[in-house]
Amino acid sequence: MEKLRILSDAAKYDVACTSSGAQKSARRGGIGSAEAVGICHSFAGDGRCISLLKVLQTNACVYDCAYCVNRRSNDTRRASFAPRELAELTIAFYRRNYIEGLFLSSGVSGTPDAATETMIETLRILREEYRFSGYIHAKAIPGADAALVRRLGMLADRLSVNIELPSGASLQRLAPDKTKAAILGPMGLIQGGIHESRDLVRFRHAPKFAPAGQSTQMIVGATNESDRQILTLTSALYTRYQLKRVFYSAYIPVNEARALPPVGTPPPLWREHRLYQADWLLRFYGFSSEELFDKTEGRLHPYLDPKCHWALRHREIFPMEVNRAPYELLLRVPGVGVKSAWRITRARRAAALTWDALAKIGVVTKRARHFLIANGKRYFDAPAANEELLLDLMSPRERTLYRQETAPVRQLSLFEEEIPTLSPVERKELSCLAAPM
């Protein structure tokens, strides 16, 4: 249990696990299943809270990555699980209904090949000896042999290779033991294995390679890359490697290093949130990374979600008639989601849609009223001025923070009855927004 405490705590900074994306049941004589729903203390569509054992095989590492809590120069307690030890622990937790699957990563205590072989043996015991069919997410270690990566993919449901830093220059400065080629190489191998496995789908019992695909993680705020650079890289990864997800992790300073924000600096949580919103637009709404910024911008708007910000910069195409607008343009209307856009295109075949009908379909009229016309009619109280529209699209908390930051500086009077102050929560959020990019 002491090993588990150390190694699960060492794994908490890896956020690349939120949805299994795999759907399968155990064969006769096996145990466990994998559902295409959330994991790691997430909530499924039916309300269930689903958990995952998230742990390292070992936190001993020969690498000295400046941002990592497990780097070799860090004075921290080290521990390792033997393959059978971790496999038995996983099965024991599963049988007690503590978990539904495993998220396994590892430090590199010797060589990448040796670390990968240890992880493979753990998964082999689970799959072949215990016949465990539950969800398993494994981390492919950069630099490992291609044959080992393929073997790992045959045992896991999802594989991931963490990019960690958004540029080669930052990687060289903070993680000199790693190279861009060593990270992107396994990504290409995994992509090829997934495509080969799909070609064998006609064979019913053919083994599947990483059926839930692959993902990666990027640290946000440890280096000075802009949001534009991060999302440009994200878009390229989706296009080239067909990743299921790119995860963003607001950097939490845990190590003292001159090239990193000092310990105690608040993590840029709002920036992480905006990147996830923009990532959603890239994957499901047909946006490109360049569309989310104008020529002079390097970061996403801190107080307005990226879709609303794009719409405000393209007022010339709004308002659009909801009964005639094509599906691709409906997706770009704030307040209209993928499902509601599809419902609009179906419902308007039978009758012209009104504002009441749009609300029933699922359109968020509080936002969409600024950008749509329903059956020739504008929403009755939609503001027209840009500043009013900007404030109306913000949440109450975002509006408060925006007003505090943009309020004009004035000379305080000795007779001031009340000096406006920020709450501790608002002060912390403003410091997060001002964190290094």
Image: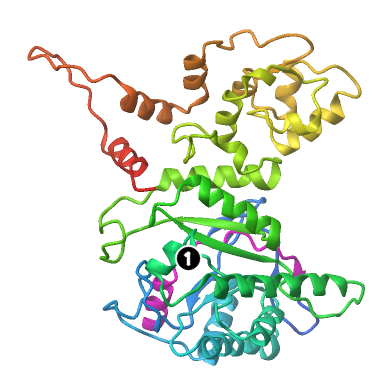
Q: As rendered, which of 339 and 308 lies closer to the eye?
A: 308
Please, what secondary structure does the residue beneath circle 1 have?
A: loop
Estimate the x, y position of residue 86 in percent, counting from the top left: 52, 85
Residue type marked 1: Asp
Q: Is residue 53 magenta?
A: no
| Crowd band around label 1 with a 10 angstrom C-alpha radius: few (<14), some (14–19), many (20+) | many
Give the left or right position of residue 363, taking residue 91 as reference. right
Q: Is residue 60 visible?
A: yes
The reply to whether residue 97 is visible in this rendering is no
Question: Quadrant of the rendered structure where residue 191 is?
Answer: bottom right
Q: Position of residue 375 (x, y in %)?
A: 79, 12
Whether 13 is among the magenta residues is yes
Q: Is residue 273 above or below residue 383?
A: below
* Residue numbers of the magenta segment: 1-25
Taking depth in this image into account, of 351 and 2 the one nearest to the observer is 351
When asked about the image quadrant of residue 143, the answer is bottom right
Most extreme residue toward the left, as rendered?
A: 414
| Rendered view: 356 above or below 85 | above
Residue under the point 22% across and 27% down:
421
Question: What residue does disc 1 label?
Answer: 14
How many numbered marks appear? 1
- Name the residue located 36 percent from the left edge and 51 percent from the top edge: 267
| Residue 361 at x, y percent in the picture | 75, 28
Q: Check the image and tell me how it is coloured.
A: rainbow
**Rendered residue at 38%/76% (across/down):** 5
Q: Is residue 115 above or below residue 242?
A: below
Q: Position of residue 155 (x, y in %)?
A: 68, 81
Q: Residue 154's image quarter?
A: bottom right
Q: If the image is split into quadrants, where does the N terminus sit?
A: bottom left
